[in-house]
Amino acid sequence: MSLRVVVIALALIGSACDKPSAADGADHGSAAATKKADDDIAREQAQFDAQRHPETVVAALGLKPGSRVADIGAGSGLLTVHLARAVAPNGKVIATDIDSGVLDMLRTRLKAAKLLDVVEPRVVNADTPSLEKGSYDAILLSEVDNYFTDPVAWLRDAAKALRPGGKIVIANRIHRLANSLAAARQAGLKLESQTTPVPTHFIAVFTVGAP
């Protein structure tokens, strides 16, 4: 074999070794896609937090490590992640929604925040709480009570799921305040406090008892 042939053969071998495999390309693409998804989640969360001040909802709920709270109509988990941080490590958030697809988005958000083990996503019927009796320190309804066919009946049923001293917290847009207060009153709930943490939304805290 001539020296020229040996040199060409070595060059071809080196080129083959340097060329990235299809698997390497796929891995890089997957990592890039994961990073973009995480960045999108972080950006959406930051925008929500700046606009809605979720810490005020957590404070209204009175959550602490070990608390058990239901997040009704949790959606993609923009509030759920804050509830999970508040009750971690040994508490529990039951995040309900009528849409299993949106709860998949919630799982992605919680996984990115390393809080997936604190939350139980639960698909429910639109007009029933589907919560265990006497098991919850707090129940949150954020921009959801206006969708119930019969909000009075829903709230009465939900009140049975509270532990002694438990709270039902309704957070919604200001123009829905009167209807939310009326439904809670008819359901036998007692208004403990009402605040407006941002100009567009109210937070109303209720306990079980005569109005």
Image (spheres, rainbow, N blue to C red):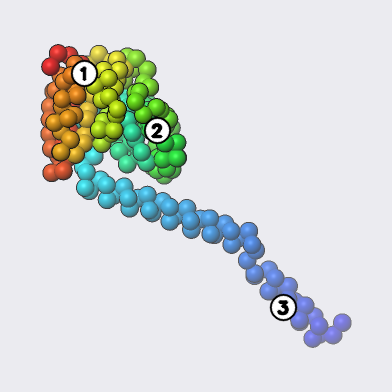
Which quadrant of the structure image shows residue 97? top left
**Pointer 2: what residue?**
98
What's under tag 2, amino acid-wise? Ile
Instruction: Confirm or deny contact between disc 2 and disc 3 (CB under 8 A).
Output: no
Packing grade of label 2 (10 A; few <14, some 14-19, many >=20) is some
Q: Identify the residue shown where x is 45% and y is 40%.
A: 101
Secondary structure, mark 2, is: loop
- Give the numbered dot on residue 54: none
Choose the circle earlier in sequence order: 2 or 3: 3
Residue 92 is situated, as x and y percent measured from the top left of the image, at 37, 26
Would you place residue 67 above or below residue 76 in this image? above
Amino acid type for the residue under numbered disc 1:
Ala
Q: What element carries label 1?
A: loop
Horizontal and vertical percent position of residue 82: 30, 37
For marks 1 and 2 on the same chain, the one whose residue lies earlier in the sequence: 2
Q: Which mark is residue 187?
A: 1
In the image, residue 85 above or below residue 90: below
Is label 1 in contact with label 2 (beta carbons under 8 Å)? Answer: no
Real-space Cα distance between discs 1 and 2?
A: 23 Å
Q: Identify the image quadrant of the C terminus.
A: top left
Task: Residue 11: give its label.
Answer: 3
Question: Which residue occupies 79% across, 86% down?
Answer: 4
At numbered mark 3, what does the secondary structure look like: helix, strand or loop? helix
Q: How crowded is mark 1: few (under 14 residues within 10 Å), some or many (20 or more)?
A: many
At 40% across and 33% down in the image, what residue appears?
98
